[in-house]
């Protein structure tokens, strides 16, 4: 596999970082046999360079399956429907639908931007009126009680 960047701005340290991460990922997934028994150490990069390489890796791991290279895709089953069911009782089998309303201007949902600062955790609401923040807290509490 050959990987390059559009600007050809990958240096030796970047390549070693990518190699180390991809070997770790391939070993974790276990789909392909690795000839090399060692995991190359990650070179020390600046925080900015590490962030750039993590973004590059995220993009790479998204693009590779589109090219039918699935060596880095885990064979996992989705969570059962009971575990991911929404907390809003009005939508038992459907995922929760959040809407953003700006009553002053008669605007509903994400069709437009409010044009003002807004806190999404309290402005986005389920049809029942429950805010995203309230819904998220309930979901987290439910997850904690399920794992105990």
Image (cartoon, grey):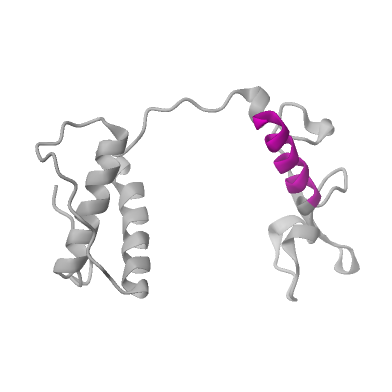
Q: Tell me the chief SS of the magenta region.
A: helix
Spot the residue most to the right.
Answer: 104
Residue 97: x %, y % from top left: 73, 43
Q: Residue 127 vs residue 111: left or right?
A: right
Q: Residue 82 vs residue 74: left or right?
A: right
Q: Quadrant of residue 103?
A: bottom right
- Which of 44/127 is in front? 44
- Which of 62/12 is in front? 12
Spot the residue most to the front.
Answer: 148
Residue 142: x %, y % from top left: 74, 35
Tell me the residue at 69%/29% (across/down): 146
Tell me the residue at 9%/36% (across/down): 35
Q: Residue 77 vs residue 106: left or right?
A: left
Judge whether 123 appears above or below 8 on screen: above
- Which of 32/97 is in front? 32
- Which of 70/6 is in front? 70
Query: Magenta residues, as a range?
Result: 134-148
Residue 86: x %, y % from top left: 73, 34
Is 141 covered by the magenta stretch?
yes
Tell me the residue at 84%/32% (across/down): 90
Can the viewer see residue 75 in this picture? yes
Judge whether 105 appears above or below 35 on screen: below
Can the viewer see residue 68 in this picture? no
Tell me the residue at 78%/42% (across/down): 138
Query: What is the total number of numbered labels drawn onto the structure image?
Result: 0
């Amino acid at each position: 596999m050959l990987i390059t960047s559009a600007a050809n701005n990958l240096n030796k340290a970047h390549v070693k970082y990518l190699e180390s991460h991809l070997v770790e990922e391939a070993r974790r997934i276990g789909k392909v046999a690795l000839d090399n028994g060692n995991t190359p150490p990650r070179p020390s990069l600046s925080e900015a360079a590490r962030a750039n390489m993590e973004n590059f890796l995220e993009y790479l791991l998204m693009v590779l399956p589109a090219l039918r290279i699935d060596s880095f895709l885990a064979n996992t089953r989705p969570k059962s429907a009971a575990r991911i069911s929404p907390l809003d009782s009005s939508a038992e089998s459907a995922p929760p639908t959040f809407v953003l309303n700006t009553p002053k201007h008669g605007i509903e949902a994400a069709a437009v931007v409010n044009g003002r600062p807004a806190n999404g955790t309290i402005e986005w609401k389920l049809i029942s009126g429950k805010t995203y923040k309230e819904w998220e807290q309930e979901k987290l509490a439910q997850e904690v009680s399920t794992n105990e």
